[in-house]
Image (cartoon, rainbow, N blue to C red):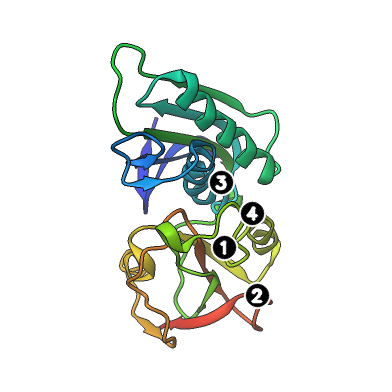
Amino acid sequence: MKAKKLRDLTLIDLDDKWLVIAVDSCGGIGVKKEDVLNVDPVLVGGLTLRVTLMEVLSTGAEIISVTNGVMNEFHPTGEKLLEGIKKELKTAKIEDVIINGSSEENFSPVSTGLAITVIGIVNKEDLKVGNDLKGLKIGLAGKPKVGNEIKLPVDDELVTYDEIYKLLKNENVVEIIPVGSKGITGELKQIKSEIKLLTDIDVGKSAGPATCALVFYKGDDIKDVKQVGDVL
């Protein structure tokens, strides 16, 4: 069995398909006494899952499994994190997915911790990652935001799952890269081609839980996608 790493993804070769794996973690955000940011664990679970869902969905893969490692007791913290995970899956219109996980029952950590792994599967010919991006336009869907900048429970400036699904169906879209804590600059550094930016947006700013996504496309401008550069 062959495997390779692309961006923050692990791809495992299954002959005519790829198994696509993404992982994200979150610590110090919750309602425990040593948490740095006070946020309902239900929202923490959902937003942490959002990062990995965006990564895997953007490759064109179908989600088949979600695993959550809770660094706290299951009741009540783990239960609330799991509630958020299930709500986020519903928001993303993902059904019949296997959810597995574990919690810490031997000790009582004083801050909230969560790690999530998402696994998807895609036909090789449908994979939308690792493509040649030369000559394409670079667009931005959503807006970079992090921490308290995100309006909870709903922020209309974040890229949505429906937008990602629509972009995946657009024949002019070659690749989609969700932006996380490394910011737009961090994501663009992984592209080997020369980049020309055409924006006054802070490209070094963290986008936290994948609040925006880079869209590499050809042809006419795309609705709700702002051109921010070109791949030379």
Nearer to us: label 3 or label 4: 4
Which tag, 3 or 4, sits closer to the chain's start? 3
Residue that appears at 54% across and 37% down? 42
Residue 25 figure quarter: top left
Q: Amino acid at mark 4?
A: Tyr
Residue 33 figure quarter: top left
Mark 1 to mark 3: distance in Å?
A: 29 Å
Q: Which residue is mark 3?
A: 124
Looking at the image, residue 227 lies above or below residue 113: below
Q: Which mark is residue 224?
A: 2
Residue that appears at 55% across and 38% down? 120
Mark 2 to mark 4: distance in Å?
A: 13 Å
Mark 3 to mark 2: distance in Å?
A: 29 Å
Q: Regarding mark 4 in the picture, which secondary structure is present there?
A: helix
Q: Which residue is mark 4?
A: 161
Which tag, 3 or 2, sits closer to the chain's start? 3
Q: Amino acid at mark 3?
A: Lys
Tag 2–tag 4 contact (CB < 8 Å): no
Which tag, 1 or 3, sits closer to the chain's start? 3
